[in-house]
């Protein structure tokens, strides 16, 4: 008859082997997010928003991502009217292009050692493959690059380079090559013609007509004395504008020649009126209207107290920019004046919201975050509603009064749902699973793990103790690298032994570009983790070449069967093998 203890140990070991696959499987294959969003956090910081965005759109937005690597130094070459700046699409230290790269900004300034800012931004390169842009300039400039991610994070500036625009000099244009047909319309402007370059000999007879003479081009200094006579002046050619100030005096005016009808609208201004000449009795009723008042002519000092009431204020004339800061306080707002519809999209951003309930929907399937709901003992809770008709109690994550985290599914009808509790009053490392039929308690002892299984009514129970040897795993150990090989990025290459006797290898290794086919990456020093026969696995790498990882009984880890040039990095994932 099989030993129950051996069977249980075998089942636990099999679950640990399957756990990595289950953790990578989708758990939301038939789920949806209604009128809400999921947030992705790392280290307590918001990293992404999946679902409905603050502006009402739907999608995936990266937030507060990592700082991108510094772009490699650009090259700068002269071109007509500016400088051509080229980026090769690479980053300092050989860092790969980040997946959330939005663009590479091109900054330029006339002095070396400048700090990139919005004032120095000229243009962008919007592809990680690199590219060439033109910086318009008439003088030499210094240029630098800054990488920018989709979440707005900026890298440090690249090394700066300098160049100037390509010169255009007369020696570069052969005599006679540029003729009238080669000149674009409007290419020759007044600014391009030297002073005195055009004289009377260069002007054809009758070439200058009235339409060719610019306004005010002919001044008094250009007209010979007595050249203008009565016969040469057109009717109405002389207006008030052509008469010099003070040239027409009272002695030149015939008696009664200046009447109201003879005055041009606007001809008499304040400067022509003597002080006190216009009095109230001289003004006709309603003669002074709003259109006669100059801008800003009416100030606060000229308005009598109480003269302006609500009737005199035009609808919507008082806007937010006319209201002084802090002039409207809570005391000025009527009860219920601010409602949800009065809040613009995005008005509530990532600032802390305290003492309230947040939920993804008002009814149906939803998630509800509450600081102290009465449902589970006024404890901090994340409630999850299935939205089904027979649902009598939501599930959720509850932090109970003992400091334990309880995971409960929704309750349907009158039955008692299962629950998983992590931690307890006696030992915070305990894990208990309670169902309507039985409960299971796993406790960490000094030398292993204890599992206590009992029925829901407590009439039957059985305990199992496992020593450290049977359930423990070995420590992670570093792979001893061969010359020229090392760790790549955030995941070091390590191995360890698992409870079921298998060994795993994980991490990313950086290998040189000339790495030979069949070369040794490193060695597994622990003899207990070496296979009894050669084990072969597929290796993912930076290039499109395919290769295999060979784990040898002597501990050597080799790369063989490469279909092309290797180099860059090799990924081992969770490679697993047996030692017997």
Image: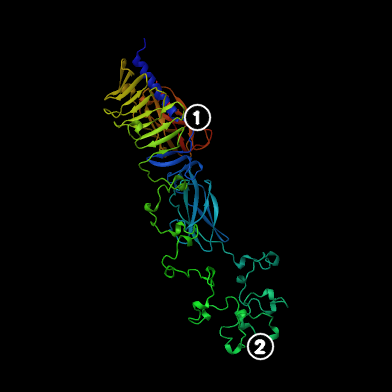
First in residue order: circle 2 vs circle 1: 1
Residue placed most toward the observer, 256 or 74? 256
Find residue 226 and name its label.
2
- Using the numbered discs, state the Cα–Cα distance from disc 2 to disc 1 in whole angstroms: 99 Å
Label 2 crowd (10 A; few <14 / some 14-19 / many >=20): few
Query: Dividing the image into 4 quarters, which one contains the C terminus?
Result: top left
The percent coordinates of residue 527 (x first, y second) are 36, 26
Quarter of the view holding residue 205 = bottom right
Disc 2, disc 1: CB below 8 Å? no
Left or right of 324: which side holds 290?
right
Farthest-out residue, right: 205
The percent coordinates of residue 455 (x first, y second) are 34, 17
What colour scheme has been applied to the protein in the rendered image?
rainbow
Q: Is residue 447 visible?
A: yes
Q: Mark 2: which secondary structure? A: loop
Quarter of the view holding residue 217 = bottom right
Q: What residue do we see at 70% from left, 83% from top? A: 232
The percent coordinates of residue 396 (x first, y second) are 39, 31
Looking at the picture, does residue 411 appear above or below residue 77? above
The percent coordinates of residue 328 (x first, y second) are 39, 55
Quarter of the view holding residue 386 = top left
Label 1 crowd (10 A; few <14 / some 14-19 / many >=20): few
Residue placed most toward the observer, 63 or 102? 63
Q: Mark 1: which secondary structure? A: loop
Residue placed under numbered mark 1 in the picture: 30
Left or right of 265: which side holds 427?
left
């Amino acid at each position: 008859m099989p030993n129950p203890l051996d069977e249980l140990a075998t089942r636990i070991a099999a679950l640990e082997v399957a756990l990595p696959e289950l953790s990578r499987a989708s758990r939301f294959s038939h789920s949806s997010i209604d009128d809400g969003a999921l947030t992705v956090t790392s280290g307590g910081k918001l990293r992404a928003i999946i679902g409905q965005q603050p502006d009402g759109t739907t999608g995936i937005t990266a937030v507060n991502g990592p700082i991108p690597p510094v772009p490699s130094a650009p090259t700068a070459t002269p071109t007509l009217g500016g400088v051509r700046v080229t980026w090769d699409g690479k980053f300092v230290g050989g860092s790969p292009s980040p997946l959330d790269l939005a663009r590479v900004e091109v900054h330029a300034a006339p002095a070396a050692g400048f700090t990139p800012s919005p004032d120095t931004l000229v243009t962008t390169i919007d592809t990680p493959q690199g590219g060439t842009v033109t910086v318009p300039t008439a003088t030499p400039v210094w240029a630098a690059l800054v990488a920018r991610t989709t979440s707005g994070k900026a890298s440090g500036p690249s090394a700066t380079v300098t160049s100037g625009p390509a010169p255009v000099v007369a020696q570069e244009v052969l005599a006679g090559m540029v003729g009238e047909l080669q000149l674009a319309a409007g290419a020759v402007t007044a600014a391009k013609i030297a002073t005195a370059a055009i004289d009377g000999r260069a002007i054809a007879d009758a070439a200058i007509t009235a339409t060719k003479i610019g306004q005010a081009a002919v001044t008094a200094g250009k007209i010979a004395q007595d050249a203008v006579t009565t016969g040469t002046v057109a009717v109405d050619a002389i207006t008030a504008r052509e008469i010099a100030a003070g040239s027409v005096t009272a002695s030149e005016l015939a008696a009664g020649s200046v009447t109201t009808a003879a005055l041009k609208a606007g001809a008499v201004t304040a400067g022509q009126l003597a002080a006190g000449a216009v009095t109230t009795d001289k003004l006709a009723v309603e003669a002074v209207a709003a259109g006669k008042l100059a801008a800003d002519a009416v100030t606060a000092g000229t308005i009598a107290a109480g003269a302006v009431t609500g009737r005199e204020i035009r609808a919507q004339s008082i806007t937010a920019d006319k209201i002084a800061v802090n002039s409207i306080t809570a005391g000025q707002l009527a009860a219920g004046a601010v409602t949800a519809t009065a809040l613009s999209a995005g008005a509530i951003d990532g600032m802390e919201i305290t003492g309230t309930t947040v939920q993804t929907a008002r009814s149906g399937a939803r998630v509800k975050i509450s600081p102290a709901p009465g449902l589970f003992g006024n404890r901090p809770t994340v409630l999850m509603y299935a939205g089904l008709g027979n649902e009598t109690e939501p599930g959720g994550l509850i932090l109970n009064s003992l400091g334990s985290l309880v995971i409960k599914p929704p309750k349907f009808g009158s039955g008692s749902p299962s629950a998983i509790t992590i931690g307890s009053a006696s030992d915070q490392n305990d894990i208990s699973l309670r169902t309507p039929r039985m409960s299971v308690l796993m406790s960490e002892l000094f030398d292993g793990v204890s599992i206590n299984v009992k029925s829901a009514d407590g009439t039957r129970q059985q305990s199992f103790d496992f020593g450290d040897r049977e359930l423990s795993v070995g420590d992670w150990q570093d792979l001893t690298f061969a010359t020229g090989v090392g760790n790549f990025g955030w995941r070091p290459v390590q191995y360890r032994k698992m409870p079921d006797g298998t060994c795993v290898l994980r991490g990313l290794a950086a290998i040189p570009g000339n790495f030979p086919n069949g070369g040794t990456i490193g060695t597994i020093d622990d003899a207990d983790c070496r296979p009894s026969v050669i084990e072969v696995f597929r290796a993912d790498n930076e290039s499109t070449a395919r290769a295999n990882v060979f784990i040898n009984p002597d501990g050597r880890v080799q790369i063989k069967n490469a279909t092309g040039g290797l180099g860059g990095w090799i990924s081992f994932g969770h490679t697993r093998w047996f030692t017997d």
